[in-house]
Image (spheres, rainbow, N blue to C red):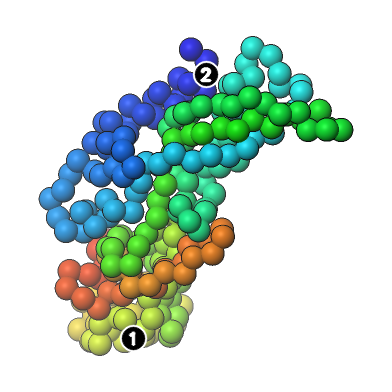
Amino acid sequence: MWTGEILLSERREKVKELGFCSGSKFVPAIENSDHLRAREKMFFHIVLERNMQLHPRHFGRDLRDKLVSKLMKDVEGTCSGRHGFVVAITGIESVGKGLIRDGTGFVTFPVKYLCVVFRPFKGEILEAVVTMVNKMGFFAEAGPVQIFVSNHLIPDDMEFQSGDVPNYTTSDGSVKIQKDSEVRLKIIGTRVDATEIFCIGTIKDDFLGVISDPGSTS
């Protein structure tokens, strides 16, 4: 078994360990709360295709290994507006016959591969880390996705406080949103282009809001 296949095999075992199925969509084994059930809809296990080019110096017995290594490097961590963010490649479905490119020596191989993708949708709930706070609202990140929560979508009892550490704080000071706070929010809108997905969120709903506040730790 070649090195790349060993890595892919380990990833598939990890997928099984986490309770994911191998269909077009996989879901976590733990389903004890609504926000976990919502989160499961954002991850998909799908087959994608890509034409990969290899230089002749990579030809040999380890050609397939080189091809898969380059595929992982080129694809993982990228974003497609149609499919979402590619989290990890988990398998190779097929590698087609190579086509020599005239005048270059490079060979193009059509590759079908299995991968885990992350694609958030409107109405889903997820946990995110606050990255910036200002009087207009705050920005947060959930993995590769950036979410903006407007001040109109923050509870009315929270007011913006300027200073060295800008934040939104309740009138009694019991709850605070600042940089590095963890929040649970709901996606109410998405903007998709060829290489990016940007979301609008709200914490103005039941069971949403601050999960952990770094300022409250001693």
CA gap, disc 2 and disc 1:
52 Å
Q: Quadrant of residue 23?
A: top left
Above or below: residue 171 compared with residue 146: below
- Residue 58 spot, x, y in % from top left: 71, 22
Tell me the residue at 40%/41% (across/down).
46
- Residue 54 spot, x, y in % from top left: 70, 29
Q: Residues within 10 Å of mark 2 (few under 14, many from 20)?
A: some
Sequence-wise, the earlier of marks 2 and 1 is 2
What residue did someone put label 2 on? 3
Q: Nearer the viewer, mark 2 or mark 1?
A: 2
As drawn, the residue found furthest toward the right would be: 103
In the picture, measured across the screen, residue 170 lies left or right of residue 193, that is left
Q: Quadrant of residue 205?
A: bottom left
Q: Quadrant of the C terminus?
A: bottom left
Q: Secondary structure at mark 2?
A: helix
Q: In front: 44, or 94?
A: 94
What residue did someone put label 1 on? 152
Q: Secondary structure at mark 1?
A: helix
Above or below: residue 9 compared with residue 43: above
Residue flagged by tag 2: what amino acid is it?
Thr
Tell me the residue at 53%/39% (across/down).
49
In the picture, measured across the screen, residue 1 lies left or right of residue 171, that is right
Residue flagged by tag 1: what amino acid is it?
His
In the picture, measured across the screen, residue 39 lies left or right of residue 9, that is left
The disc label shown at residue 202, or none: none
- Residue 142 spot, x, y in % from top left: 39, 58
Res. 14 in view: yes
Q: In front: 133, or 112?
A: 112
Q: Quadrant of residue 8?
A: top left
Above or below: residue 30 compared with residue 128: above
Q: In front: 96, or 26?
A: 96
- Residue 9 spot, x, y in % from top left: 40, 23
